[in-house]
Every structure is written in C-alpha cells, then in structure tokens.
Image (cartoon, helix red, strand yellow):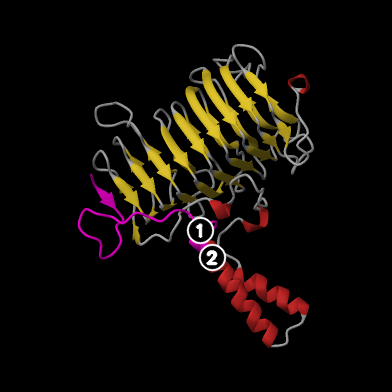
Amino acid sequence: MSRIGTESGASPGISPRVPQPTPRPWRHKLYRAVTGLVLLLVLTSGCTSDTLHKSLVESTQEPQEDVATQPPDEGEFPAMETTGPRAEPTESTGPTETTQAGEIIERTTINGRLTIKHDDVTVEDVVVRGTGTYMIYIIRKDNGECPRNVRLEYIEVDGSRAPADSIPIYSPECGFTIDHGLLHNLGRGIRIANDVRIENTYIHLARTWEGAHRSGISTHGGKDVVVKDSAIFCENVGCSAAITMYGDHAPVQQVLVQHNLIATTGSYCVYGGSVDSKQYPHGANIKFIDNHFSTRYFPTCGRYGPITGFGAGVRGNVWRGNVWGESEEPIPESAL
C-alpha cells in the first residue's frame, strides 16, 4: 500500500489518521478569526458604520471564491462549511497519477490534474486545484478494465485556476464514490456513466462562457448511479439544468436521486433520462425520491419546470415525496 501526503515526522509507511470532522473545516475557522480581529480593530479606532462595513468586506473576502453568487446554507443539506477537507493539507504537489493498487492520497494540495487508474484508491482530505480540461480523471487500467473501489472522501475541487469549461471529475466509463465533496469555482460539473455514488456533496457552478451548455451532474448514458443527500446548484448563463441525464451513447438505467437540494437558472432543474431527441430515449428504473426542488431562481425551480424528459410511472420510473424546496409543498406526479 502506498501513501501520498503523510505528515512531517510520521514513521515511514504510516500516516496518522485525520480526526473526525468538526462542524466547519479549518479554512472557515481561519476566516472567522480574521473577521473577529478586523472587527476589534475598527471598533477601537472609532470607524463609522459605513467604514466598518467597507473594512470588513475588503479585509475578509476570500480570493477567487464565487462568494457573490454563493447559495446560502440550507441547513439539512451540505454547504461549503460542512464539506471538503477536515484539516488543512500538510503537503503540496503538482499533477499526480496513481502508481499502484491500494494507494492512499491524503492531506495534500494537488496543483493540476489527479489521474486515477488503479484499484482500491482512496483520496481523502485533499484539495485539487485544477488547471486543465479535467481536474480529477478516472480512466481504465493498463489491462483495459475499470479501476474498482475508487473513493474520494472529504475532498475539495477548486476550478478557479482552470478554464471555465473544465470538468472537475471526469469518469466517462468507470465508477467511483464521492462523499463530502466540495466542488466550486466551476463552469461545468461532474461527468459520469456507470457505477457512481455521489453523497453528502456540495456542487456549485457559477462560471460560464459563450455558447455554454452546463450542468452540475451529467451523464450521456449509463447505469447504477446514486445521487443522494447532496446540494447541486447551476446558475448564470448557459445552464441546461442542475442534473442532466441524456441517452446519447447508452440508455439511462438504474438511477436513484434521493434527498437532494436542486436549483438552477436553466430551463429545467433536471432532465430525467427519457429525452425523445436522443438515440436511447427511454430511461428505465430512474427514481426521484424526497428531493427539494428550490424556487430560488424561478418559482418552478427551472425556468419551465422542475423536470422534463422523465417518463414518470413507466418502465420502473418512480416519482415520490419530492417537494418545493422552500415551502416543502409536495410536487405530485400529476403536475409534471
């Protein structure tokens, strides 16, 4: 087993485990501390209320964050403060590629692409500051098989140094699990196909470009996907939806979308896997359960409605317990 990112002073081959997550990651504790110090200084210097406000804003804003458009904390759903690394990374490196099965990459800032092509790889408490087209790239092994049991836990993917049309996690064929991920400063979202679990993760897209077609999570065909207990936001010009499921390359099948907060400035909050214009227009066994479709941008979640191209009640598709995010009023299947 190989480890990248051990703490200084650790015994060879042994990396101390990271403590259990606190309510807020280290970066937000630092931010609050700086805010408190600035407040104390301006109060003791006799500033007016206008000067006080200006001083707080100029002195405490985190650089290159999409603060101006950041959705507010939604309580039961993931937020920037409750996702991402549980402790500050202890090392920094450039583009990184896995070298063997069982590798653990932890407490490291990766500047550039992280490429994963081995079984049983765990990436935890890591910051990936992408600079190119793909920030985390999961590809087939040398023998042509997909890597098994790839886990991304308590990671942050920051796209502020990459082009707006870059993809934070690109896995066009192979599966993975992401848990407590923080994905921000992005134009595009996660691109997936088969055997993917996205849980307890915060995805916020606000960057754009001319002719953009963007979504927080997208698939162009695949099966065995779970999106659960996550917050997915796509805003600004060029959003197609928060989640897009299109049957371009294969049917969309066996998908569970459960207990997520979803919002977009696009046409619909979700494209549900049964889009007539696609080569495989009939999604099957797609379940939307207990999701909150936010009315933050439009009273219908998306400009024209919460979901399209779904096929509720046929081929094993299920629509149950979904509500409007702010009022928690039910969205019945008959309203789709």
Local packing at callout 2 (Cα closer than 10 Å; few below 14, some 14-19, many 20+) is: few
What residue is rendered at 54% in x and 20% in y?
Answer: 247
Disc 2 secondary structure class: helix
Residue 69 lies left or right of residue 166; in this view the side is right
Which amino acid type is marked by label 1? Pro
Give the farthest residue toward the bottom. 45
Local packing at callout 1 (Cα closer than 10 Å; few below 14, some 14-19, many 20+) is: some
Name the quadrant containing residue 120.
top left
Q: Which residue does the numbered mark 1 point to in the structure image?
A: 25
Q: Is residue 45 above or below residue 310?
A: below
Does the magenta run of residues contain 26?
Answer: yes
| Image: magenta residue range | 1-27
Q: Looking at the image, which is closer to me, 57 or 293?
A: 293
Give the farthest residue toward the front. 20
> Would you say the residues marked 1 and 2 are in contact, meaning their CB atoms lie under 8 Å apart?
yes
Q: Which residue does the numbered mark 2 point to in the structure image?
A: 29
Q: Looking at the image, which is closer to me, 43 or 68?
A: 43
Which amino acid type is marked by label 2? Lys
Please state the horizontal and vertical placement of residue 219, each as a whole percent of the image. 52, 28
**Magenta span dominant secondary structure:** loop
Whether residue 170 is visible, yes or no, is no
Q: Looking at the image, which is closer to me, 294 or 273?
A: 294
Q: CA distance from mark 1 to mark 2?
A: 7 Å
Q: Is residue 113 above or below residue 101?
A: below
